[in-house]
Image (cartoon, helix red, strand yellow):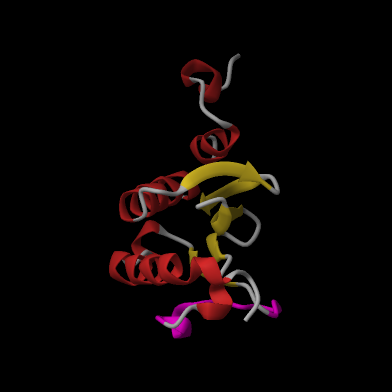
Amino acid sequence: MKSISNLWNMNPAEDYIINQEEPFKTILLQLQVLVESTVPAVELKYKYRIPFYYLKGKPFCYLNVSPKKGYVDVGFWSSAHLSVHLDKMVTEGRKVMRSLRYHTLEDLDADVFLAVIKDAETVNHKGFWK
């Protein structure tokens, strides 16, 4: 049986998204719409075996599913420079990288997510380290 991606010639990042189990697939699709409609210049690539958005040739954010822990993680490459909604972001043993986590679609507060994405867009040129 052919995978869904073969039917539509999707790139590996899109394949990753569309072949996830629920609720992860719906969360990822919503995040994809929000990212791509808010920052149209992003390019979706498949890096480190996950969907990874790039902006002007530099890493921007990634989408990662952790089925065992039951969430979708949205990590921000320039998170050391972010200034909004830091109280809602997870660091969990990481020194620099911050992320937003979603267990259900209802967890996704679009206003918070959009504010973080817009902030990330303005600081992405600063890179990974502070």
Q: Is residue 99 visible?
A: no
| Residue at position x 33%, y 65% in the image | 114
Left or right: where does residue 95 sit relative to residue 21? right
In this picture, is 84 found above or below 11?
below
- For the record, the magenta segment spans 84-95
Residue 107, x across and y down, in percent: 38, 66
Q: Is residue 83 magenta?
A: no
One can see residue 8 in this view: yes
**Coordinates of residue 92 in the picture (x, y in percent):** 65, 78
For residue 93, above or below residue 57: below
**Residue at the image position 57 percent from the left and 22 percent from the top:** 3
Residue extending farthest left: 111
Number of marks in the rendered image:
0
The prevailing secondary structure element of the residues shown in magenta is loop
Work out whether 76 lies above or below 56: below
Is 86 inside the magenta-drawn segment? yes
Q: Quadrant of the N terminus?
A: top right
Determine the residue located farthest toward the top in the rendered image. Answer: 1
Tell me where residue 91 appears, x and y as whole percent. Answer: 61, 78
Q: Nearer the viewer, residue 25 or 85?
A: 85
Residue sitting at x 51%, y 43%: 44
Percent x, y of residue 127: 60, 69
Q: What quarter of the picture does the C terminus occupy?
A: bottom right
**For the view shown, which residue lies furthest in the bottom direction?**
87
- Residue 108 placement, left or right of 102: left
